[in-house]
Amino acid sequence: MTGDQVTGWALAAGRGDADAAAAFVRATQREVWRFLHHLAGPAELEDLTQETYLRALRSLPRFAGRSSARTWLFTIARRVAADHVRAAMARPRIAAVTDWQAAADAATVAGRGGFEEDLAVRDLLGGLSPERREAFVATQILGLSYAEAAEVCDCPVGTIRSRVARAREDLVTLLADERAGRRLSG
């Protein structure tokens, strides 16, 4: 399906077409989930995805199609993730286990083992600054153009290019450090 189709469904949904709204969600939910997966923790992923669509569906009547619907939706998802991080930082964290130290130690040991590839990528991406991670995920994982990513991240295209380039450098360094750490501990 093309970006024009997705934008067409968004515009039709904004005019009250329930079938178009369903098609819009089906066409975009996997990408929104992937985007949020790299910006937030897995425990919050379903809630953040749902919040993204709640905000988007409420805003569809005002969507004018000046940008692609995908770009518009990723902008909403980015704001949802940022709101979540701000709210999480404002409240104290409570451990859901009785022996939090043992759970932390077990997670650390498991992290050095053979995690599936997507978990390893998530760990590496977690080492990036939020701005670099957003730009990298938007362009390299979701396949947005630099112009679309700039719109999603609300910054100039040159800034996106710079963030992606620096994210690549950071990822190479993080990967080299991780490999060196494995050699030293193994």
Image (cartoon, helix red, strand yellow):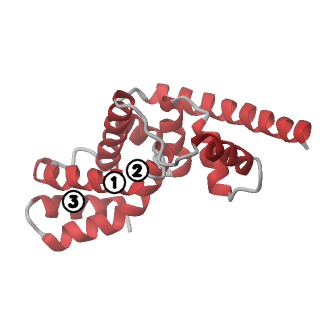
Q: Residues within 10 Å of mark 2 (few under 14, many from 20)?
A: few
Decide: marks 3, 2 in contact (CB < 8 A)?
Answer: no
Residue topped by disc 3:
10
Q: Amino acid at mark 1?
A: Asp
Q: Which is nearer the eye, 28 or 64?
A: 28
At 21% from the left edge and 59% from the top edge, which residue is drawn? 10
Displayed quadrant of residue 27: bottom left
Q: Secondary structure at mark 1?
A: helix
At 54% from the left edge and 50% from the top edge, which residue is drawn? 141
Decide: marks 2, 1 in contact (CB < 8 A)?
Answer: yes
Residue 65: image location, x then y, percent: 21, 49
Residue 20, compared with residue 157, is above or below; it is below
Q: Secondary structure at mark 2?
A: loop
Q: Which is nearer the eye, 119 or 186?
A: 186
At 65% from the left edge and 41% from the top edge, which residue is drawn? 124
Q: Secondary structure at mark 3?
A: helix
Q: Which is nearer the eye, 30 or 163?
A: 30
Residue 66, compared with residue 60, is above or below; it is above
Residue topped by disc 1:
47
Q: Nearer the viewer, mark 3 or mark 2?
A: 2
